[in-house]
Image (cartoon, grey):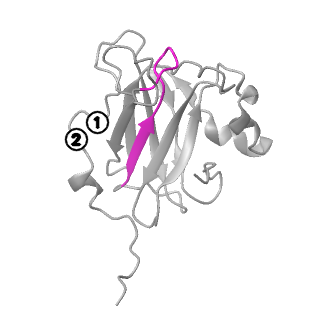
């Protein structure tokens, strides 16, 4: 007998969060800023039981990963995890990622979203408005009229990046 398929569910807040998950860098880190947003479903309603994960390079373009032997800036974790609130909001405190050597990629943050109703996570990227993102091969592969869904908006304390899972103005997601 096979087990029926099940979507990602409300267990996210039980087993996948930790107290400092939203801090990619410690509070008070020079150059740190918030990336905040809201996750919306296909009807434009907040997703209150979701989880947003981020993974990125440090300001020098290095990853906190065994495959990157260069090491990272002290105190830089590179990974963040923020559960959504009852009004769908999430946030991570981070620093601007540096360029990746030889990749031609614009500074960006990789994002995974987990939520009820999804069989698998969805994956996107956050790009920043102050850069020429068109030189990035992934960004350039997205149709021009959809690219704006990948670019964060500047705010007083960082950036805003809303994630729309379906419908009008759906965020571009990548097949990884």
Task: Tell me if 152 is positioned left or right of 6 in this view.
Answer: right
Task: Tell me if 104 is positioned left or right of 74 in this view.
Answer: right
Which mark, residue 21?
1
Quarter of the rendering containing residue 101: top right
Residue 59: % across, % down: 48, 16
Q: Residue 12 versus residue 58: which sits nearer the camera? A: 58
Quarter of the rendering containing residue 151: top right
Q: Is residue 88 visible?
A: no
Extreme residue in the top direction: 30
- Classify 10 Å Cα crowding around label 1: few (below 14), some (14-19), many (20 and above): some
Residue 104: % across, % down: 69, 25
Task: Tell me if 85 is positioned left or right of 40 in this view.
Answer: left
Q: Secondary structure at mark 2?
A: loop
Residue 129: % across, % down: 64, 24
Q: Residue 115 versus residue 153: which sits nearer the camera? A: 115
Could you tell me how far apart the alpha carbons at marks 2 and 1 are, in whole angstroms?
5 Å
Residue 52: % across, % down: 41, 45
> Which is the main secondary structure of the residues drawn in magenta?
loop
Q: Residue at x 35, y 55 (%)?
A: 48
Seen in the picture, residue 143 relative to 165 is either above or below; the reply is above
Dividing the image into 4 quarters, which one contains the N terminus?
A: bottom left
Task: Tell me if 36 is positioned left or right of 104 in this view.
Answer: left
Extreme residue in the right direction: 144
Q: Are marks 2 and 1 in contact (CB under 8 Å)?
A: yes
Q: Residue at x 38, y 9 (%)?
A: 30
Which mark, residue 18?
2
Q: Residue at x 48, y 25 (%)?
A: 57
- The region drawn magenta spans 50-63
Per the image, is 114 magenta?
Answer: no
Q: Secondary structure at mark 1?
A: loop
């Amino acid at each position: 007998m096979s087990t029926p398929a099940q979507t990602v569910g409300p267990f996210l807040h039980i087993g996948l969060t930790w107290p400092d998950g939203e801090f990619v860098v410690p509070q008070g880190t020079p150059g740190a800023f918030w990336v905040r947003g809201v996750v919306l479903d296909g009807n434009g309603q907040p997703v209150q039981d979701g989880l947003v994960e981020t993974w990125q390079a440090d300001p020098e373009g290095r990853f906190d990963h065994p495959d990157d032997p260069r090491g990272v800036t002290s105190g830089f974790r590179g990974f963040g995890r923020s559960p959504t609130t009852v009004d769908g909001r999430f946030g991570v405190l981070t620093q601007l990622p540096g360029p990746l050597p030889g990749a031609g990629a614009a500074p960006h943050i990789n994002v995974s979203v987990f939520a009820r109703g999804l069989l698998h996570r969805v994956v996107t990227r956050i790009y920043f408005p102050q850069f020429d993102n068109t030189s990035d091969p992934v960004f350039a592969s997205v149709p021009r009229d959809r690219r704006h869904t990948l670019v964060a908006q500047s705010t007083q304390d960082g950036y805003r990046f809303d994630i729309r899972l379906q419908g009008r103005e759906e965020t571009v997601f990548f097949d990884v």
